[in-house]
Image (tube, helix red, strand yellow):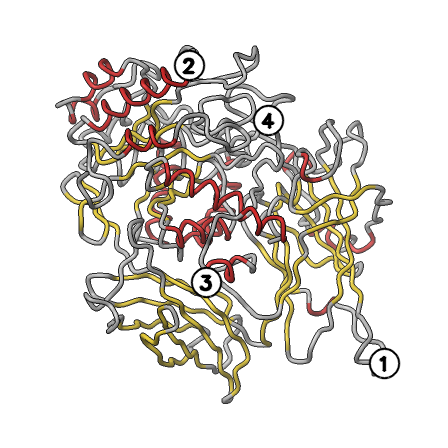
Amino acid sequence: MTTTEAASMPKLSKEIEDRLRYPNPQCIRTNWVDLDGEWEFYLPPSSSPVPDGAGNNALFDDPATLAAVNSVEFPEFDRTITVPYSYTFPKSGVKEPAYHPVVWYRRGFALDPRPARRYMLHFEAVDYACDVWINGHHVGSHRGGMTPFMFDITPYLAARDGDDSSATVSNEIVVKAVDFNRPDQPLGKQSWKDTNFACWYTRTIGIWQSVWIEEVGATYLADFVMTPHVADSKLSVDAELDDLKNASLRYRVTFHGEPVADGAVSFTGGRARFDIPMQDWHADTGIRTWSPETPDLYDIDFDVVVDGETVDSVSSYFGMRDISVDDGLVFLNDQKYYMKLLLNQGYYHDGGLTGTAAEVAGDIEKMKAMGFNGNRIHQKLESHRALYLCDALGFIAWAEFPSGYEFGPTLVGNIERELPAYLAKHVNHPAVFAYVLMNESWGVFDIVHSKRQQDFVNSLYWQAKAYDPSRLVIGNDGYEQVMTDVCTLHDYNADADDLLKTYEGREQEVKDGAPSPMSGRRACCPGYRHLDVPLMITEYGGVAYETDGHQSDSWGYGDRIATPDEVVAQIRALTKAVMDIDYCVGFCYTQTTDVEQEVNGLLDHAHDYKFDPQEIRKIMLSGQTYGYVKV
């Protein structure tokens, strides 16, 4: 986080600011190197022929070509770029309007490797496939544009020359990224056409989230999953070492520095599974629960101990909260909970999909000020820092997997490849309430009639439930439901009276029919009617309004409304209609901000208010239960 970013950050506690200094606030190690910033950059001519294998995004992972990978000739780097921004957006510093499916990066970094330590190179996201070299040695390939990955670069680092302890040890990293923006790879809201259209936007290519190196022990904590159980006042931990050495794990739980629990367990076969009793004697009820109203987080420190010596240390945190559904309702910590979410696409006018911690914190502050208690992060994976801010500031997040648009074996393989990392990125975040696996049948357009496509979406649902049964899972958000924990419907009907008439007192008819006059799609696929699950309207509104007058290429739902007051009146009427549906347990309004040509945000594309936030807040805090409290 730069000085400029810190200056624009909403006022946060010192604890939050301290964690935000590290790229992954949920897994902090002391020694690390920040690789965000200026890199050398090269764009091959956009007219260059597509290389062999590009049709399936193959790079150097084919065994037949792997042997030759270290003989690849690097290009002449003739530009610079600011990482982690795609060259397609202004913050990258690259002024290049043409589409280039292949991009190259290079930068030097100083690192003095210590004995008995290892060094992990982390990429939070590179779109779409990439190869990485350290000091001319190929260290690995990765395919998948949305999920984090890392390489152990210890064997490839330059060693100190001689005994001069003051000498700087220089290293070089080179990255090649390839992205042909195929509709059979997870794209989210990136246009796969030559230009933007409807609600699809400028492409993201190459490194678009943070890059860093961290020092770990020769034996280190490779992974840990923390699952809270509020009713049992315990935290379950599943910790994994990188190898099978005999080792133990010490842990210490604190709340704002006050001790809560500590202990030690042994690893067996590289794994330790254990429960931590959470009797917090400083809390009135014996335990502090996380909710948007009280976003209490416990700190937890882990130490890996081998032969009596601490070889690796990690600082993390967790929240104690339970999510469940029963009898058509959603419960948070065993209390009925009504979610009022905003569809949040996380696009920035100068940075695209890449938002700074200050920008994200500002967005959350504005969304909360307008009366919302959460956001549905739409068609992208947010950064570690953004998810931490949802945890720390008390803001629900629905984590949505980005869609592809062409069903077949390639799309199935591409989604399956990234799904485990998608789940792993979110599993320890208390703010994450739901996994949304598909949206509006994108990529499975024939799901109503195709058993194959239904089976695919159901397979994703069951994989998510097997990995993490503690959250809601939505198989196909919007309509044409198969396996799901919530029946989620999208309805952009602009007539509030007609909207209410469609749903009021008709729960089973709605689930069995095709309620939205706009989409005309069935709520549920054949064989999945009569779903005994809660119902939410997870997209509605989308009232289009342009602060600078109507533009010919703009897009939004419904007719343009002339004045801000008329827009607010329309939002009020539509929201009241949704909240008057007695069996609807929450909603998601479209949307947080304008995005490029799409102009139906409550904020504009620069993320400034388009309407009086207090007027929006009055709407959102009226009617149905807000969180736990009737207002």
The answer to whether mark 1 and mark 4 are in CB contact below 8 A is: no
The residue identified by callout 2 is 563
Identified by mark 1, the residue type is Gly
**Secondary structure under the numbered disc 1 in the rendered image:** loop
Q: CA distance from mark 4 to mark 3?
A: 41 Å
Q: Nearer the viewer, mark 3 or mark 1?
A: 3
Q: Which residue is mark 4?
A: 192
Labels 2 & 4 near each other (Cβ < 8 A): no
N-term-proximal mark, 1 vs 4: 1
Tag nearer the camera, 3 or 2: 2
Residue 248 higher or lower than 536, as above or below: below
How many callouts does the rendering have? 4
Disc 2 versus disc 1: distance between alpha carbons? Answer: 72 Å
Q: Quadrant of residue 218?
A: bottom right
Eyeballing the image, is 329 above or below 566?
below
Give the amino acid at mark 2: Thr
Q: Residues within 10 Å of mark 1 (few under 14, many from 20)?
A: few
Could you tell me residue 494's position as x and y percent?
A: 32, 15
Mark 4 is surrounded, within 10 Å at the Cα level, by few (under 14), some (14 to 19) or many (20 or more) other residues, namely some
Which secondary structure lies at badge 2?
A: loop
Q: Judge from the rendering whether residue 426 lies leftward or rightward of residue 571; answer left or right.
A: right
Residue in view at x 44 percent, y 51 percent? 389
User: Which residue is located at x 29 percent, y 50 percent?
Assistant: 293
